Image (cartoon, rainbow, N blue to C red):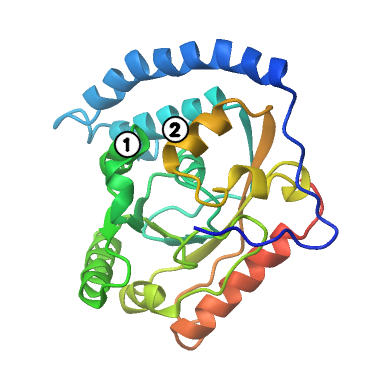
Amino acid sequence: MSEPAPRPGRRRPRRAAGPARLLRYLYRIPLLLLHLLLPLPLTLLCQAPGLRELRIGSESLGDRAVRAWSGGLMWVFGFRLRRIGQPLRGPVLFVANHVSWVDIEMLHSQRMMGFVAKREIASWPVVGWLATLGQTIYHQRGNTDSLAGVIAVMLQRLRQGRAVGVFPEGRTRGGDEVGPFHARIFQAAVEAGVPVQPVALRYGHRGEAQTVVAFGPRESFFANFVRLLGEPARTAEVHFLAPVQPGELDGRRRIAEVCRERIVAAMEGPAA
């Protein structure tokens, strides 16, 4: 996929010198292996019938385990999470800007939700497997029948009282802009009568690292995964913004426009 040129006035952060990157690989690779070998089996165990449904406070043991594992993975990669606002409880459609595969892990670290994602993610190492474990709804891009089926599954889950997360841009865009939102994906929330909460995902100080975290031109998932493992530590902000309540706005297109406006405003705001 191609990467648009950065906006005027926003410089792409320089990649750290070779020795510093090598040093980060030397301690992060063992941490990643430990995260796969120790916490991951425990996360799997917590998904077993009988354990998964156990309640710990307001969430199940299975959901809490996935959240903890995702938060740990973000820490291994050097992301220091900062949450602004609170995710709604109950059935909610969460909509966020899309930068990279990291977005899914960051959101899963905050609130369990079944994502709508492209089918190719299922074959990605580690992240694809975790995405499936995290109740991802896979969509074949460009396939109208697939989208109709996805919306039907979204509607079913929302009516069951579960949360769903979507990236209404439909794809990543290099990190330098928030693209237009596809309104059709909001139809499930309209029919289910549930709130839609926009979420702004921002990497680095005031989003200066968006283009670093995003996929580069023709960069594969594996290449991006390895590159980010060697990046300097930086903040990762997740902004849970004012939701659109059922019946507050007329039609899915208007809901999509307002959600995008709120995300763009948060992306351009001061550092949290």
- The residue positioned 26% from the left and 66% from the top of the image is 150
Question: Which image quarter: residue 160?
Answer: bottom left
Task: Return the residue nearer the eye: 253 or 217.
Answer: 217
**Residue 166 spot, x, y in % from top left:** 42, 61
How many labels sit on residues?
A: 2
Crowd band around label 2 with a 10 angstrom C-alpha radius: few (<14), some (14–19), many (20+): many
**Looking at the image, which residue sits at the far bottom?**
250
**Residue 148 spot, x, y in % from top left:** 24, 75
* Image vertical order of residue 45 relative to residue 121, above or below: above
Residues at circles 1 and 2 in contact by the CB criterion of under 8 Å:
yes
Cα distance in 3D space between marks 1 and 2: 9 Å
**Looking at the image, which residue sits at the far front?**
218
- The residue positioned 51% from the left and 73% from the top of the image is 181
Crowd band around label 1 with a 10 angstrom C-alpha radius: few (<14), some (14–19), many (20+): many
**Residue 258 spot, x, y in % from top left:** 59, 76
Task: Return the residue nearer the eye: 255 or 193.
Answer: 255
**Looking at the image, which residue sits at the far right?**
9
**Looking at the image, which residue sits at the far left?**
49
Q: Amino acid at mark 2?
A: Ser
Q: Which residue is mark 2?
A: 70
Label 1 or label 2, whichever comes before in sequence order? 2
* Image vertical order of residue 203 relative to residue 167, above or below: above
* Image vertical order of residue 260 relative to residue 71, above or below: below
- The residue positioned 34% from the left and 32% from the top of the image is 126
Relative to 123, 218 lies left or right: right
Q: Which residue is mark 1?
A: 130
- The residue positioned 30% from the left and 25% from the top of the image is 43
**Residue 119 spot, x, y in % from top left:** 28, 55
